[in-house]
Amino acid sequence: MWRVGLVFVILALACSGCAGQAGVDASDVESVAKGNQITVLVLGTGNKWATRVEPDLYMVVQARQPTPIERVQADLSECQAAARTVWNSAATERDRTILASEGPAYNPGAQVSKAAMDLLAKAYENCLQPKGYKASRSDSSG
């Protein structure tokens, strides 16, 4: 019986890490589910000293109507994956190369072109809109 409990705790910790990876915690998901407007870190870490080399992309997200929490989490994760697919595409290859050459202490605002950031934001927006959300690029960085 204790094995099942241990596995559950490990899975719960792993799942909470998945939600936090995109800058979306459980309270953010609940807020979006209620229809509140939330600023979400879609890509990046929000920390220039992190080892991941993705630009920090913040988006403002709001459900057009109340939505089940599980669906919001799934939709946000799916669209984060869509934005990451764009980041890993040939369209942004030059920007990825620049970040990789800078190492872990990069400055996303200075290193990633506006065109690449616009492309990432548009991919996220295009993914969320048909699912019933409003999404737009955040003017702030968090």
Image: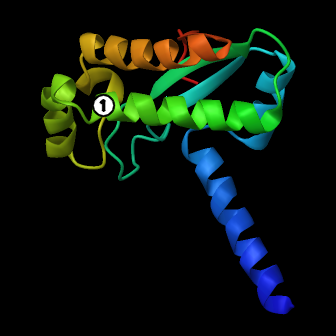
Q: Secondary structure at mark 1?
A: helix
Q: Is residue 50 left or right of residue 53?
A: right
Disc 1 designates what residue? 87
Q: Position of residue 95 (x, y in %)?
A: 19, 28
Rendered image quadrant of residue 23: top right
Q: Residue at x 83, y 81 (%)?
A: 5
Q: Residue at x 59, y 51 (%)?
A: 18
Callout count = 1
Q: Quadrant of the C terminus?
A: top right
Rendered image quadrant of residue 14: bottom right
**Farthest-out residue, front:** 130
Q: Quadrant of the N terminus?
A: bottom right
Q: Residue at x 34, y 37 (%)?
A: 54
Rendered image quadrant of residue 44: top left
Q: How is the image coloured?
A: rainbow
Q: Is residue 14 left or right of residue 59?
A: right
Q: Position of residue 57 (x, y in %)?
A: 45, 25
Identified by mark 1, the residue type is: Trp
